[in-house]
Amino acid sequence: MEKKTLFDKIWDAHVVKSVPAGPDVFFIDKHFIHEVTSPVAFLNLEKRGVSVLYPERTVATPDHNVPTVDQDKTIKDKLSRMQVEKLRENCKKYDIELHDLGTDHHGIVHVIGPELGITQPGMTIVCGDSHTSTHGAFGAIAFGIGTSEVEMVLATQCIMQSKPKKMRITVDGELGQGVTSKDIILYIISKITAAGATGYFVEYAGSAFRNLSMEARMTVCNMSIEMGARGGLIAPDQTTFDYLKGKRYAPKGEAWDRAVAEWTALQTDEGAVFEKEYNFDAADIEPMITYGTNPGMGIKIKDLIPTDEGLEGSNKKSFLKSLDYMGFAPGEAIKGKVVDYVFVGSCTNGRIEDIRAVANFVKGKKKADNITAWIVPGSREVEKLASEEGLVQILEEAGFQLRQPGCSACLAMNDDKIPSGKYAVSTSNRNFEGRQGPGARTLLASPLTVAAVAVTGKITDPREV
């Protein structure tokens, strides 16, 4: 019998038709949409006189460019307002489930999907957003698609897709104090580069991943994209089942028992072949931070920024250009650098565990005077839990500004922008030039590191606070 990877098992079960020497016609179980990439897709459906084939398989929420203050009022920005209104119109017209601003389950698309139990093992999931890979934490094939593919899924529930190559990244051992899932993935990307997994779908394996919570696994899979991968996934286990049980859209009763039996079989067969494998030791991972303009430009927080020694031609030129943009010099220490903003939020680290970690760290402390500190829950559910658990009070007493759910300062598509030339230590996923605003300088780090920076006003190893 052929030995199959977890990825093979899910992929092969969803191929409707294979095109000789071409892509597969690939069935999609769940489709998430938001206000930015869906309007044109719906417009094209109307032009063609085509309806939505399976509206019950699509779920919508506005998140990318919505304001994170005064969400009960009319959106001031004209384009944002039009996009959100158009999403509402399209969902009503085609009978698509919408978790709108102000409703109990509004939030970032990749936060509410798992929260509601819509995301389940063995599924194929797409969204017009690259960080759809987040859902792979449940043992699902999840990836981002473009506007034309959004239209294709709405019309046919399928897309044309070539099967990616397979990579396995194994991390074994126990993580040290102050080391989080965000540090694991930043460490991996620093080792294999921001393009190291291009063309691959990654399975994460080993004890370090098995010991993570579901929220931490989502952080890892979310950033698979930042090393060029098509997506990432982790085999489902008891941690997965415990997280899903009782969720709104999770199976119930006998259907739950049948589902768990099926999900338990979603494992890579022993002896299955991957085109590429990496192995890392958890003991070597420490709190990480980026110093450049792609997520692969990361170092242990205690280390020096690399020099350009050994780099030639375009590699050297781009390295120096990146450091020039960031205002850093080759070979200098990053620890101790004064910063201006901290941001906790996004589909990478805007979940309740992230907010708990920051609140526990800053309890009884005050943010530094030079720091503007934003904390943005990933959903209304996270916001509600943070309030019920007393985290909001702790964070506000520490000087953090609590905002309403949305993508916020992850990307410069809404009002929450970092001013030009200012430094922001962020729990989000990307740090290219202008990502958080024109001229903004972004350093990616874990929620714990962000908390340490907030209270000291400079780049700080969280283990030392």
Image (cartoon, rainbow, N blue to C red):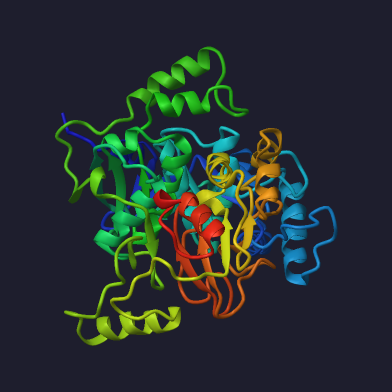
Using the image as rendered, state which of residue 350 and residue 13 is in the foreground: 350
Where the N terminus falls, by quadrant?
Answer: top left
Q: Going by the image, does 193 lie left or right of 415?
A: left
Direction top: furthest residue: 254
Q: Is residue 393 visible?
A: yes
Instruction: Using the rendered view, name the quadrant where residue 53 is placed.
Output: top right
Marks counted in the figure total: 0
Instruction: Using the rendered view, name the quadrant where residue 77 is placed.
Output: bottom right
| Residue beneath the point at 42% across and 27% down | 239
Q: Is residue 24 visible?
A: no
| Residue beneath the point at 76% across and 58% down | 69
Direction right: furthest residue: 73
Q: Going by the image, does 38 lie left or right of 162?
A: right
Where does residue 34 sit, x and y in percent of width and height?
Answer: 63, 55
Using the image as rendered, state which of residue 329 and residue 419 is in the foreground: 329
Using the image as rendered, state which of residue 4 and residue 104 is in the foreground: 104
| Residue beneath the point at 48% across and 76% down | 433
Where does residue 335 sit, x and y in percent of width and height?
Answer: 39, 66
Where does residue 345 sit, x and y in percent of width and height?
Answer: 57, 53
Where does residue 320 sit, x and y in percent of width and height?
Answer: 33, 83
Q: Is residue 385 above or below residue 306?
A: above
Q: Is residue 347 above or below residue 387?
A: below
Q: Going by the image, does 170 lie left or right of 250?
A: left
Using the image as rendered, state which of residue 443 and residue 189 is in the foreground: 443
Q: Is residue 126 above or below residue 213?
A: below
